[in-house]
Each structure stands twice: as C-alpha cells, then as structure tokens.
C-alpha cells in the first residue's frame, strides 16, 4: 500500500521502501501501515541474522554525524532503542545501490538485504503514548543525485505514526540545523530553554501534541495548514543570557512556544518565540 496523501517529495516513495527494527515482543504494538505505507522489512535485533543490517544502521549514523563527532556506539542502539522501542526508516535493497554507494556503506560481498538511507529513533516514556526523540539520520545530503529532499522530516513524521505516539518530546541545541525540521510539525512547547542537566547547557527541551495534521504537515502535505501564534520574543542562538532569562521565566510558571523555523540574520540564527 502507498501513502494516503501527497508529500513535498513523492520521489522518495518511488525509490525507497520502509523498515522497522523491533523485538518480537514489541512488534504487535507497531502500526505496520502508517498512513497506508506498508513496512517492507521488519528486523528483530535479537536474531543473529539481523547483524549485518544493524551494522549498516551504525554506518548510516556515522555517515550522518561522524564529521560532527556524534556517532553512537552499537550498545546505545541496542540499549536505548532496539530493545525498549523501535527504529523506523527508509531503505533500498543492496542490489539497487551503485558500486560507489555499496563501498561507502561497506556492504559485505553477497549481502542482498536492505540498506538504510534514513532512520528515526524514539524512546517510550512512562506516560502512555509519550515518546522522546533520540536520533534522526538521513543521507539526503550524502547522495544528492538521488533527490531525497525532505527525507529526514518524512522519516520522523511517518515513524511517529508507526509508533502510535500521542505526545512527543525532544532535546536539541539552539544552533542545531535540526530545528528547521522539528518546527515543521507546528509550534513547539518549550519545556527548558537552558538545561544544565545536559552536557551542553545551551539545549532546549521541546514537545508537541502528535496529530495526523501535524505529521502530514511535516511531510509537506499542502492540504494541511497549522496555526502558529505570533512571536513575542526573538532570541539569538548564541544569546546564553537570553536563554537563562527564558528558563527563569519558565520555572516561574510562564509558557513559551517556538512558533517557526529559525531565521538567519547576518549569519546568525534567530528564534521566534511566543509567550502564551
């Protein structure tokens, strides 16, 4: 089955199929046809036969984040995602890759299974239906010749539908380019603006209520329009004192939302916030 609506880049769906990594016990909790898009590969991380694909997932992570020094050890995948939750993404059969692509991935000779081009990892939280975003990886920039623009946000959106998420939380840095993706899901509730508990204090914790409309909007469905409040505060991505001030206000009971993607002004990321 195919996706039930048009996206910003339907060429992604013409090239790639979807996979999910989940244990046998967790698989019944999955929606294997999110928005009508049938999952082609279900990978059980507790089976030896899954080893090559899971190695390729780590390679995907390294290709995405290696230059920034953020690749994950395999135990992080296993402990934080594959056992307690799921990993969802887009992939291509190995025999449909070019030789150069196979070499970049380090595909073993004779491997004919799926090769991941994107993945989204989320971890279930204590609250029923609440999920915390852990990792979003996409090779859109690595393989520009495949025209996979929008692959990251489409992966996250359809993954949240597959996981059955009703409330979503995430944490990222004020200067992260990922905010251009996360804000596609609508206004983001800001839980922390300055976070000493994180190894990088200039981190915000954000969240939103997951609806079909928010997920479809993130995929680029032009029939969906999300309401966004008008900004009341503009915060530069390097303004640590401003972050601390917003954090103090939040701790005093104020509510803030990030109402859209950062704007670039004189090479500086400026965030639009609304105090509700």
Image (cartoon, rainbow, N blue to C red):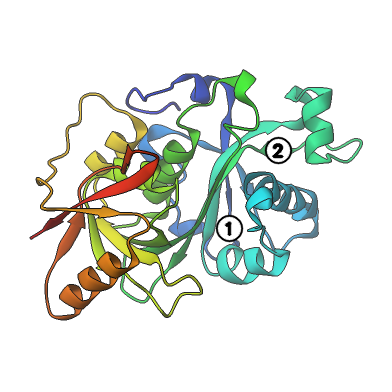
The quarter of the image holding the N terminus is: top left
Disc 1 to disc 2, C-alpha distance? 17 Å
The residue lying toward the viewer, choosing from 101 and 252, is 252
Dot in front, 1 or 2: 2
**Residue 203 numbered mark, or none:** none
Rendered location of residue 50, percent (x, y) = 75, 53
Residue that mark 1 sits on = 22
Residue at image point 25% right, 56% down? 208
Q: Earlier in the sequence, mark 1 or mark 2?
A: 1
Rendered location of residue 246, percent (x, y) = 21, 69
The residue lying toward the viewer, choosing from 261 and 102, is 261
| Residue 104 sits in quarter | top right
Residue at image point 75% right, 25% down? 97
The residue lying toward the viewer, choosing from 7 and 34, is 7
- Please say if 56 is above or below 195: above
Q: Is residue 167 visible?
A: no
Rendered location of residue 101, percent (x, y) = 77, 29
Outermost residue to the right: 109
Residue at image point 34% right, 22% down? 6
- Please say if 231 is above or below 226: below
**Residue 115 numbered mark, or none:** 2
- Please say if 105 is above or below 87: above
Left or right position of 86 against 274: right
Outermost residue to the front: 266
The residue lying toward the viewer, choosing from 111 and 232, is 232
Left or right position of 171 against 144: left
The quarter of the image holding the C terminus is: bottom left
């Amino acid at each position: 089955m195919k996706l039930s609506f048009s996206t910003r880049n339907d060429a992604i769906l013409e090239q790639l199929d979807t996979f999910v990594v989940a244990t046998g016990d967790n698989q019944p909790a999955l929606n294997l046809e999110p928005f009508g898009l049938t999952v082609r590969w279900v990978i059980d991380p507790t089976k030896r036969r899954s080893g090559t694909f899971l190695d390729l997932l780590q390679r995907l992570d390294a290709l995405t984040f290696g230059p920034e020094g953020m690749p994950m050890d395999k135990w992080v995948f296993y402990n934080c995602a594959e056992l307690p939750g799921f990993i969802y993404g887009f992939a291509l059969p190995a025999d449909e890759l070019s030789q150069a692509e196979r070499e970049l991935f380090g595909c073993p000779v004779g491997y004919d299974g799926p090769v991941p081009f994107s993945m989204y990892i989320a971890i279930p939280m204590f609250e029923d239906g609440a999920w915390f975003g852990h990792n979003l990886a996409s090779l859109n920039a690595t393989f520009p010749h495949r025209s996979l623009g929008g692959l990251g946000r489409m992966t996250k959106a359809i993954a949240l539908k597959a996981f059955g998420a009703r409330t979503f939380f995430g944490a990222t840095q004020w200067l992260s380019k990922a905010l251009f993706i996360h804000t596609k899901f609508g206004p983001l509730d800001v839980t922390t603006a300055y976070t000493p508990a994180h190894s990088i204090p200039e981190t915000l914790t954000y969240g939103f209520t997951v609806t079909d409309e928010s997920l479809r909007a993130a995929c680029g469905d032009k029939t969906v329009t999300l309401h966004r409040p008008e900004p009341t505060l503009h915060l530069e991505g390097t303004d640590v004192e401003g972050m601390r001030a917003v954090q103090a206000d939040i701790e005093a009971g104020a509510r803030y939302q990030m109402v859209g993607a950062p704007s670039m002004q004189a090479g500086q990321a400026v965030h639009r916030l609304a105090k509700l």
